Amino acid sequence: MVYIVALASMLLGVLVGLLIIQDYAGRGIGLCGNHQEEFQLKAEFRNGRLVVSITNLGSSEVEVQMVFLEGRDYIDFEAPINVPVKPGDTVEIRTEIMQPDGGTCTVRVKLSNGRTLDCKIAAR
């Protein structure tokens, strides 16, 4: 009985270790967050509409596919966008997403490499 528990613990440890290594290699399932160190996301409202700015600090080109705005009892999105962002470039995207009445919202951007970037914004 003790050997079965030890074997199960060892297999679970190996599995978790492999998942962590796979995540660090960039092919993983996202155990360590959104990898936002390769991108900078800024968002603001201009003239009542959401504007997002994305800087690509990585080494490969990505496309912005979707932009979401989520708040308390509020969600809106714009898709498809398909705006390319080259390495080292900053791209500003003016959306048709309207500014909600108030509160704090989460801006979520989906990229073509499967990653999702988030930032908080105040809707005044």
Image (tube, rainbow, N blue to C red):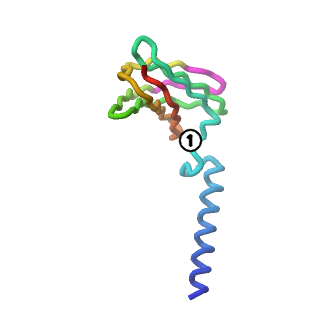
Q: Is residue 102 left or right of residue 23?
A: left
Q: Is residue 103 above or below residue 17?
A: above
Image quadrant where one finds the C terminus: top left
Q: Is residue 4 magenta?
A: no
The residue that appears at 60% across and 63% down in the rendered structure is 16
Q: What percent of the width, then of the height, locates residue 118? A: 51, 34
- Write down the quadrant of residue 99 in the picture: top left
Q: Report the number of numbered marks.
A: 1
Identify the residue under disc 1: 34
Residue for point 35% across, 32% down? 75
Quadrant (top left, top right, bottom left, bottom right) of the N terminus: bottom right
- The magenta stretch spans residue 86: yes
Magenta stretch: give its range: 82-91
Residue nearest the viewer, comparing 52 with 62: 52
In the image, residue 114 lies at what x, y percent? 51, 41
Please provide percent x and percent y for residue 17. Answer: 64, 62
In-image side of 68 versus 3 (left or right): left
Q: In the displayed orientation, state which residue is furthest to the left.
A: 73
Q: As shown in the figure, which amino acid type bears the numbered disc 1?
A: Asn
How would you rate the neighbour count of disc 1 (Cα within 10 Å): few for under 14, some for 14-19, many for 20 or more?
some
Residue occupying the point 57% across, 51% down: 31
Q: Measuring from the top left, give residue 23's x and y in whole percent.
A: 61, 51
At 36% from the left edge and 20% from the top edge, which residue is drawn?
Answer: 98
Where disc 1 sits, the SS reads: loop
- Residue lying furthest bottom in this view? 1
Looking at the image, the residue that sits furthest to the top is 47
Depth check, front residue: 48 or 80: 48
